[in-house]
Image (cartoon, rainbow, N blue to C red):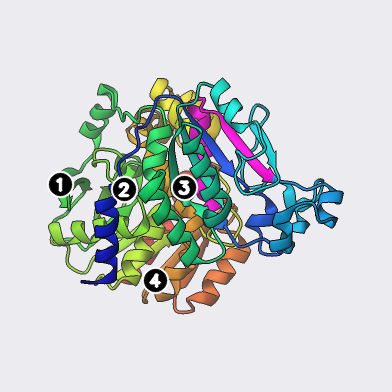
Amino acid sequence: MPADERLDSVYDRAGFGASVPRGSRPALVVVDLTRGFTEPGFPSGADLTAEVTATAALVAEARRRNVPVIYTAISYTPAEADGDAIAWLRKAPGMRALREGSEAVDLDPRIDQREGDHLVLKKGASAFHGTALAALLTSLGTDTVVVCGATTSGCVRATAVDAVQSGFNTLVVREACGDRARAPHDAALFDLQAKYADVIGLDDALAYLSVPDVRTLGQAALADLGTVPATSRWVRSGPVRLHVLDYGPSDGVPVLLLPGITSPAVTMDFVARELTDLVRPLVLDVRGRGLSDDAPNYDLGSYATDVEAVVAGLDLRDPILFGHSMGARIAARAAAGGLPLRGTVLVDPPLSGPGRAPYPTTLDAFLGQLDQARRGTDADEVARSWPRWPRREQELRARWLSSCSRTAIAATHAGFESEDFFTDWPRVPAPAYFLYGGASPVVTAAGAAEAAERNPAAEFVEIPEAGHMVFWDQPDAALAALREVLRKLL
């Protein structure tokens, strides 16, 4: 019998691994995501970009539900840092750098700490040891503690164990916990799952912390489909039903359009209908948007699998993939994976990723716009965020944004920081075209130069004065550039 099976049987016989109840009054405890732990330049630090990004998504969602957010930090006085009174520092002298008032004990600036958040200072591994955390959680009425932070095998594990021993149901978020090495990280999560807490994924945690993720479409939005010169097609990708707007003609070269993070298929109607004299545009409602189903996962691999399912399900022979923003990342992943294509057109893909500058639009901004749409919004309110857009596009945004899943947006935004575009981009085969806005904060001039260097076979086209929303900002120039690129691919 393999060792892992023997281990599982031992734990099963011991009766470990039961599920933890999830109460209605959670609190989020962010353990030690200070610069001394999240930046490799400090003795106790490591590059925890992905974990910080996942935690930022949890914090944003907690705020929307008014879930308390509690940060912890290790902080030593000069006497403690320089002396011999703290036994832990004899074993881990590198942590003497965690001195009060130093940059090492500042919370990572990528996490949005606000007035009203709680901060617990501690001297040891557990956030409960020698602190008032248990009393604070009790005074807040907490029944379930959601734990994330650093390091998994040290302070996170100790805090989770003491949370259980203090009487709280405890959840530990896998993607939001980081360590200096993989083996202790995995071992700690295994032990926590077996004996103390439920170790859950980021999507599951976001869904638990969030307000109910109810996607809606009003009659006015559905009526928009009556003015769209396209036929609805449906494809299955595993259990997920995907909706596609097919503009025809059936004998045209298929171009599969992949929209951005909060753009259902209908919002790209103004682009697709201008291409039917050249090609056969098909616009996908990406999972969790428009008329397509919700899904358990919103990572690039899952999105790329959906693209493959659409290509196979609709029998699209040698299609062109054309993606904007999130859709460009998806197109790059599908193309790099070997999907047979006539060519690839990427428009202003997010270049953010581990070790890079964050995506310029915050998750709070996206979810704030979603909240507006769900309570009821109009084109005038949309115009305050997107003043340069044509009026019809502002109206479609107002009517269709509420069809987007909150979980899909949050998970995808986290992916902008944890999934690296440049892992896929050098493997995207020619012919490949990279269009970007000349005034885009997402693809800067430096970013475009790096992309050109990393895939020298690709051709680059700048759309002057366009921001990230290239086709919405400069529709005539962007459509002209796109049409020219498509002609080269025919």
In the rendered structure, find residue 16 and report the number of the disc placed on it. 2
| Residue located beneath label 1 in the image | 234
Residue placed at 39% from the left, 27% from the top? 23
Quarter holding the N terminus? bottom left
Residue placed at 65% from the left, 37% from the top? 113
Kind of residue indicated by mark 1:
Trp
Q: Residues within 10 Å of mark 2 (few under 14, many from 20)?
A: some
Residue 404 visible to an observer of this rendering: yes
Depth check, front residue: 394 or 137 = 137
Residue placed at 70% from the left, 46% from the top? 123
Residue 452 at what x, y percent from top left?
Answer: 53, 73
Q: Which is closer to the viewer, label 3 or label 4?
A: 3
Q: Do the residues bearing badges 2 and 4 touch, measured as CB atoms within 8 Å? A: no
| Residue located beneath label 4 in the image | 432
Decide which of tag 1 and tag 3 comes sooner along the chain: 1
Whether 184 is drawn above or below 131: the answer is below
Quadrant in which residue 290 is drawn: top left
Tell me where the magenta segment starts and ends, as one range.
50-73
Kind of residue indicated by mark 2:
Phe
- Badge 1 marks a residue whose secondary structure is strand
- Badge 3 marks a residue whose secondary structure is helix
Q: Do the residues bearing badges 4 and 1 touch, measured as CB atoms within 8 Å? A: no
Residue 422 at what x, y percent from top left?
Answer: 48, 68
**Gap in angstroms between the C-alphas marked 4 and 1:** 28 Å
**Gap in angstroms between the C-alphas marked 1 and 2:** 43 Å
Kind of residue indicated by mark 3:
His
